[in-house]
Structure formats: structure tokens, C-alpha cells
């Protein structure tokens, strides 16, 4: 039986569908209390039902007043926040040159600035508690970029950098930070409601970013990763005594990270003499 003292209070962004909804469902099944947020909280109730342990809250991560109101509602209902899951975000497919400035700004407003706004709003509570865990949903694309996903991956690279700094800043205060790097999981992420394609399409990129557009369509809803299993791992992570800084999920993510590490090590070895030659002579 889960006692009141052992219950964790989750604050999850982008919780009306996909991975966010699965994490909320798993946390509720584990006996925890969940503040599930989305632009339209009615969709949360439609997906997760009604429960005394569930608080659906309207939240637009790009609006700081909305963020403050959502955090205030969470604290008024449950009195604390133990696990913050920054999950809200969307994808963008297109070569870097094909991506308009407006597309870039809009993506960063949600994937980076929105994550920062929510984190800043929750941190005073976590610092006061001297406890808690921040889970930032990145992607294998936050560790290794590729054609067609350059701008999207750049937002996740930003999430990785922010998470590393937060991990070091908050560890002395008893607050953990883990950046989760999923590979391809079978959600609606590659469908129209979760990923945007650039309007521009330049013929010179047909063999790089152009191929990625086609592959994304063929892979959608056939991805190897099970989002239900991912959500269960998140619950286990929330109870870990020493949560990791990085947690890749999916065999494809592990393979991609190992390949990136091997490439970096090989290239560094090849250029080591040049790299160290720029110091002042000793």
C-alpha cells in the first residue's frame, strides 16, 4: 500500500497524449499523484479519466503567466512537487536552409524556452524541499544530430546542455536532474499533430533531408520502442536513490550513442596533435 508520505507528486507537461500521457498513467497506477498539463485539459480527462489523484491543468509553456498559474494550482492541490517531467515539445523536419526563421523561433519557444519557464517556476519549491527530480525529455537527437532534423536536434542539444548545468547546480541541494534520450518510440510523434515539415523543399537536399522526410513517414506508428515500457521506467527512475544524468532508452538510441562516441574518439585521436598544438609553449 502506498502511504501519503511515500506518494510522489508529479508535474508533467504535454500530458494529453503520447509519452506524456503514458507517464501520467504509469505514475497514477503506481499510487502517485499527478498534475497533468496540456493546452486543453479536457483532453487529459478524456485520456486518463477522473481521479482524486489527478489534477488536469491548462498550460501553455510559451506563456509565463500560464506557467505560474499551473504551478500555483499544483501546490494549492497537493502542497508539493516531487517530480517535474518536461515533456512538452514537437518536431520539425527539413534541411537547415529550408527552415524559416519563424519556424526556428516557434520551435525554440516550446522546446527550449518553454522548458526553461516551467523549470524556473518549479525550482523554488524543489529548493525549499531540498528534494525532487527533474526529468527533461530530450531525444537520441539531443546526442547525435542528422540531416533533416538539424534544427529540431539543436533544441534538444540545448536541453542537454541545460540539464548538465542544472545537474551540477542542484546536486548540492538534494535535487536530481536526468535528461532522457529516447530513440524511436511508437507514438504519434511523427504524425502531423506532433511534427512539422518545412514549407520549403530544395532539390539539392533530396538525397539527405529529402530522404529523411520519406523515412519518417514510413517509420511512423511502426517504431520499435514501447511507450508503456518507457513510462514504467520513468516511475522506477523517480524512485532511484542515485538517478543518472543521462538515460538513453531504446536499443536504437543505445546503438546511435555508441556509434557517436566511437566516431568522436576516432576523430579526436586523428586530430589530437593539431588540437593540443594551439596552447602557448611551455
Image (spheres, rainbow, N blue to C red):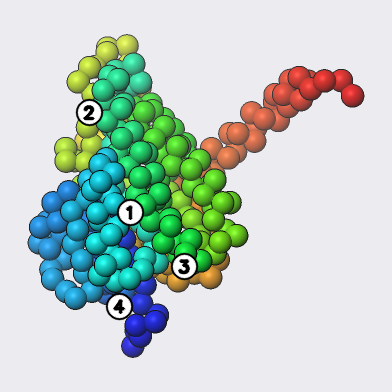
At horizontal 60% and vertical 34% (from top left) the residue drawn is 264
The mark that comes first in sequence, 2 or 4, is: 4
Say which of marks 4 and 3 sits in front: 3
In the image, residue 10 sits, relative to residue 93, either above or below, namely below
Left or right of 30, for residue 60? left
In the image, residue 178 sits, relative to residue 268, either above or below, namely below
The mark that comes first in sequence, 3 or 2, is: 3
Q: Residues within 10 Å of mark 3 (few under 14, many from 20)?
A: some
Residue 222 visible somewhere in the drawing: no
Q: Residues within 10 Å of mark 4 (few under 14, many from 20)?
A: some
Q: Quadrant of the C terminus?
A: top right
In the image, residue 147 sits, relative to residue 244, either above or below, namely above
Residue 6 in the image: state x and y as whole percent: 40, 80
Q: Which residue, given by chain and number where applicable, does mark 4 sit on?
A: 31
In the image, residue 109 sits, relative to residue 222, either above or below, namely above
Left or right of 127, for residue 235? left
Q: Residue furthest bottom?
A: 1
Q: CA distance from mark 3 to mark 1?
A: 35 Å
Give me the disc on residue 129: 3
At horizontal 64% and vertical 28% (from top left) the residue drawn is 267
Give me the disc on residue 197: 2
Query: Marks 4 and 1: CB-CB under 8 Å?
Result: no
Residue 135 in the image: state x and y as whole percent: 41, 56
The mark that comes first in sequence, 4 or 1, is: 4
Q: Which residue, given by chain and number where applicable, does mark 1 sit on?
A: 225
Amino acid at each position: 500500500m502506498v502511504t501519503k508520505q511515500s506518494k510522489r507528486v508529479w508535474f508533467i507537461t504535454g500530458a494529453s497524449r503520447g509519452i506524456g500521457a503514458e507517464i501520467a498513467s504509469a505514475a497514477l497506477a503506481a499510487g502517485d499523484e499527478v498534475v497533468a498539463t496540456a493546452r486543453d485539459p479536457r483532453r487529459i480527462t478524456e485520456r486518463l479519466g477522473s481521479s482524486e489523484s489527478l489534477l488536469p491543468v491548462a498550460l501553455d509553456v510559451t506563456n509565463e503567466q500560464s506557467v505560474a498559474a499551473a504551478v500555483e494550482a499544483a501546490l494549492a492541490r497537493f502542497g508539493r512537487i516531487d517530480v517535474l517531467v518536461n515533456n512538452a515539445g514537437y518536431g520539425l523536419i527539413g534541411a537547415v536552409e529550408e527552415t524559416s526563421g519563424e519556424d526556428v523561433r516557434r520551435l525554440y519557444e516550446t522546446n527550449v524556452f518553454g522548458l526553461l519557464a516551467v523549470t524556473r517556476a518549479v525550482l523554488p519549491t524543489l529548493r525549499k524541499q531540498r528534494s525532487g527530480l527533474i526529468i527533461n525529455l530530450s531525444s537520441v537527437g539531443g546526442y547525435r544530430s542528422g540531416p533533416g532534423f538539424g534544427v529540431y536536434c539543436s533544441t534538444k542539444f540545448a536541453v542537454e546542455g541545460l540539464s548538465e548545468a542544472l545537474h551540477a547546480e542542484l546536486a548540492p541541494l538534494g535535487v536530481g536532474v536526468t535528461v532522457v534520450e529516447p530513440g524511436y518510440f511508437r507514438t504519434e510523434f511523427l504524425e502531423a499533430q506532433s511534427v512539422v515539415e518545412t514549407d520549403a523543399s530544395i532539390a539539392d537536399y533530396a538525397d539527405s533531408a529529402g530522404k529523411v522526410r520519406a523515412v519518417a513517414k514510413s517509420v511512423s506508428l511502426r517504431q520499435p520502442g514501447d511507450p508503456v515500457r518507457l513510462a514504467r521506467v520513468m516511475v522506477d527512475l523517480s524512485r532511484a536513490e542515485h538517478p543518472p544524468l543521462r538515460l538513453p532508452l531504446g536499443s536504437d538510441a543505445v546503438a546511435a550513442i555508441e556509434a557517436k562516441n566511437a566516431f568522436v574518439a576516432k576523430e579526436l585521436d586523428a586530430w589530437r596533435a593539431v588540437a593540443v598544438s594551439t596552447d602557448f609553449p611551455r
